[in-house]
Amino acid sequence: MTTDLPSPCFVLEAEKLKANLCKLRYLQDQTDIQILHTLKSFHSREGLKIISEYLSGFSAGNQRELDKLHQIPSTHIHSYAPVFRPDEIKPLAFQSNTLSFNSLHQWECYTSSISTDSSIGLRINPQLTLKQPKYCNPNYTTHLGVPYQTFLQAYANDPKLFQALEGLHFHAFCSQGLNGLKYLLSHISKNYQEILPRLQWLNLGGGHQFTHTTYDTEGFITLINTFRSHYPHLLLYFEPGESVVKDTGYFSTTILDIIPGEIPIVILDTSIEAHLLDIAITKQKPIIRNTSIQQTPYPYQLSGMSCIAGDTIGTYFFEEALHIDDKVIFEDMMGYSIVKQTEFNGIEKAGFRVDEGIAPIYL
Ligand SMILES: Cc1ncc(COP(=O)(O)O)c(C=O)c1O
């Protein structure tokens, strides 16, 4: 193992990112959709430069996210947030090709002042019945998007209110395969017949497992091309985050102490609250390199270095005995971890490096 990495450190594996981006570009090329990378999932500059070479653009929530794109080329910017502040909406609209509002109130407040700056739309909650983890299932919340029946009723009552409406935005998924998208497209075809002919675009959100090995890529191409044949005037945007950076890098940590016991406790130079918040929120057990699901003679309980009692990562069965100064590597750590770092308990943010893939760092 190399010693020139700071510890702890997130390492982006550029070749793996490019492999994901090739898959996404294939989807774009075969269907004429535009795929936008969602900045809230990952916005490390070196990665964004690579992403910009393959995808159509980016999806942002506010000016600070857009600032991450300084001097990074982008054909299309979409902006959306659960709420826009009065002082940010005008400059944000000016920098966005498309923008969607989250509520009818925000729609009414801001439409007239920004409709010449950006193509504007509304986020709709399609209230799909889907089995998805609660923390990331937008269908069951009432604050993310206008519930579709409320929107349809408002449209029927006063279509003039929606004269400036050019797009609808649906973000309904959390790590979904093709069946979720089939369900969403059939919801759209069924419920918005009157409105679709006058729109210019649909944003079909994120949460698609586009780069997972099991994703039905050819099924996606057929589904989208069939949908587009019914609505050829509509531009279709997707805004994945997680699947852009899925399995494209790891988090390297160092063992600072080992407390003996029936299951020895390993204290790492990291902390859930400082570097791994997504794990705390999703309650998923991260995959650790050189461990096994089967029991081995080397069980260890991994803990963080903060003074919170709950700063424990879990018990793992390692292939070999561990020692102080050894590295512990967390797999698939590019999405939603780097962006959520804090400085809780005075713990510094982790380093970030790019492995260009010419000379792999870990063999
Ligand atoms: C509105 C919106 N679009 C896109 C995404 C990206 O979703 P994912 O990273 O699951 O693809 C999110 C994630 O929270 C989101 O809130």
Image (cartoon, helix red, strand yellow):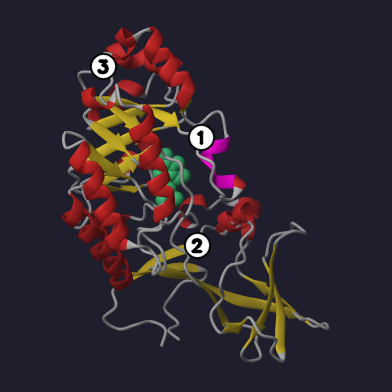
Q: Secondary structure at mark 2?
A: loop
- Along the horizontal axis of the image, is 128 left or right of 198? right
Counting from the top left corner in percent of width and height, residue 206 is at 39, 47
Q: Residue furthest right?
A: 262
Is residue 40 something one can see in this rendering? no
Residue type beneath disc 1: Gln
Camera-near label (2 vs 3) is: 3
Q: For this rendering, which residue is in front, 308 or 239?
A: 239
**Rendered view: 226 above or below 189:** below
Give whichever of discs 2 and 3 has the lower sequence position. Answer: 3
Q: Residue at x 16, y 37 (%)?
A: 232
Label 2 to label 3: alpha-carbon separation = 45 Å
Q: In the image, which residues are magenta?
A: 135-140
Quickly name the residue at label 1: 127
Counting from the top left corner in percent of width and height, residue 31 is at 19, 51
Label 1 to label 2: alpha-carbon separation = 38 Å
Q: Secondary structure at mark 1?
A: loop
Residue type beneath disc 3: Ala
Quickly name the residue at label 3: 164
Q: For this rendering, which residue is in front, 193 or 170?
A: 193
- Give the position of the N terminus as an image quadrant: bottom left
Quickly name the residue at label 2: 350
